[in-house]
Amino acid sequence: MIRRGVVLLAGLCLYSVPTVYAQDAGAISAADTAWMLVSTALVLLMTPALAFFYGGLVRAKNALNTMMMSFVALGLSGVLWVALGYSLAFGEGNSFIGDLSMAFLSGVGLEGGGHGAYPHLLFMAFQGTFFIITAALISGAVVERMRFSAYVLFIAFWGLLVYAPVAHWVWGGGWIADLDALDFAGGAVVHVNAAAAAVVAALMLKPRKDYGRQALLPHNVPFVLLGAGLLWFGWFGFNGGSALAADGIAGLAFVNTMLAPGATLVLWAILDYVRNGHVTAVGTATAIVVGLVAITPAAGFVGPLSAVLIGAIATFPSYFAIDWRARSGFDDSLDVFAAHGIGGITGALLTGVFASTAWGSASGLIEGNAMQVGIQALSIVVVFIYSGGLTFVILNTINLVIPIRVERKEEAFGMDVVNHGEQGYTTGEGAVLVRIDD
Amino acid sequence: MKLIKAIIRREQLNSVLKALFAIDVKGITVVDVRGHGGETERIETYRGTRVKMELADKVMLEIGLSEPFVGAAVKAIIEAARTGEVGDGKIFVLPIDKVYRIRTGEEDRAAVTPVES
């Protein structure tokens, strides 16, 4: 695993105490275990946070459906991870995919393992939270029109056929790891991967029926801010936990996670003000997510000032991508591509620029290793094509069985009542109790 | 002088407004309403409590118009609000005794004639 390798190296060079345990295969470090327990819970919280972020951005009649697209992954993707996903991603296998040696957690127990000085089971759970949120991220491109049952099938197959192999390539000892691509916490695996699926899904579903004809406004901007805030909080576990130890690199990733979105927020606000005359709340929430996405691949490889620069630079491509998308016919409804795709690509490339041996990483461009940027670019392109291509195949296959899009009148009526038999906001007036035996 | 009360689907409101603005009907009040109009009842479930939603959310437009505009407005609303399913709504046309514009004190036809702002 590339991250572990780098972290170990860093531990030996700079932080001699904390990671020594990791070399002893069976040992458990109380500190590492505690941090990974906390990190796992933090990353899991990001999925409900995403539900609020996305849920606030849609119209009131689709609020529950949008939030459920995230919440359902907490169960479905979690169970699939235990059944097959973890083994396919982290089993020995070959350079393309793992194997089924750890299917249904076979041999995954309490022993400290090659992953770090904490129970193997906990490593499995930590990685499972990434599997869950990556599937949920895609939903932002398909909201307000995708049939819920088709969505559920889609994230199940996408998780096993796309996420698991890609995670294997980068973190499970696969071919991208062999290239020495740098992806600290999932710029390619999580963000570029989900964004490629989002682009293809949005194109296949076609725009919402009112898209470009009516203003489709966020129904609850406070939810959007709440979601962005909770995402940021959870992201400390996402990036900090990706050090896979309670060590200096965890501290570095943690601090970078605080700084980069701050820089994005400031520049986004300035752009907003200069271009529109206002600093907007939805813009601020979006900026936080973009900054977090951009720092994800770099978090444990770059110094804090580089993190500020990465956050600042990442503002521009995503800002103008959203600006363009809103005027285009491309209904990536909640800008998964602009935030996670463009943000993830920018972050992954800048990781290759700013990665620094002074902070325990391999060298990047500014230390004279221009090759690293090329390696980063290659990993992005391959992940994008693989994820996009398989998304096309999976959605077309599902569409043969269940139409992936709801009917026009259902879309007009609202996804909450049609798909879930519930409303997000109801007074209860006019609701008559039905006896079960009626 | 007539008052049009049109009860329509919420999701048709935008197209109805667009149709009305297109024929220069610009004085419109929109009210959120709930009602029962013979649609199929929806069953919703909240933690095991099953309820039949007898009332559907609609919007009602109230528009005061002088006679020559009434026919065109009714036609525009019907065309823009119709989906062909039960629950498309109703239009009532009522007589009005008197209309005043508060700002100027103008009455009747002058009071419902849009001014350039």
Image (spheres, rainbow, N blue to C red):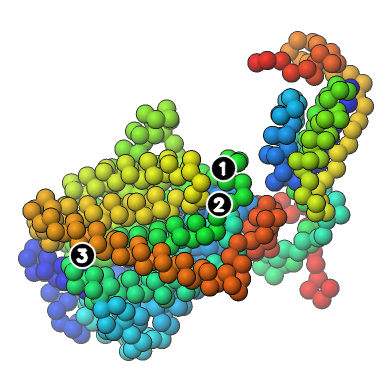
Neighbours of disc 3 within 10 Å: few (<14), some (14-19), many (20+): many
Coordinates of residue B104 in the picture (x, y in percent): 75, 10
Label 3 in the same subunit as label 2:
yes
Hey, what amino acid is under mark 2? Pro
Label 2 in the same subunit as label 1:
yes
Q: Give the residue at x 89% y 33%.
A: B93
Q: Earlier in the sequence, mark 3 or mark 2?
A: 3
Q: Give the residue at x 32% y 55%.
A: A344
Q: Give the residue at x 8% y 53%.
A: A367
Read off the chain for label 3. A
**Label 3, on which residue?**
A181
Hey, what amino acid is under mark 1? Gly
Residue contact between numbered discs 3 and 2, judged by CB atoms under 8 Å: no
Neighbours of disc 1 within 10 Å: few (<14), some (14-19), many (20+): some
Quarter holding the C terminus of chain A is bottom right
Label 3 in the same subunit as label 1:
yes
Q: Earlier in the sequence, mark 2 or mark 1?
A: 2
SS assignment at label 1: loop
SS assignment at label 3: loop
The Cα–Cα distance between marks 3 and 1, rounded to whole angstroms, is: 40 Å
Read off the chain for label 2. A
Q: Observer-nearest residue: A342 or A399?
A: A399
**Label 2, on which residue?**
A207
Read off the chain for label 1. A
**Label 1, on which residue?**
A212
Neighbours of disc 2 within 10 Å: few (<14), some (14-19), many (20+): some
Coordinates of residue A94 in the picture (x, y in percent): 27, 82
Q: Observer-nearest residue: A251 or B75?
A: B75
Q: Nearer the viewer, mark 3 or mark 2?
A: 2
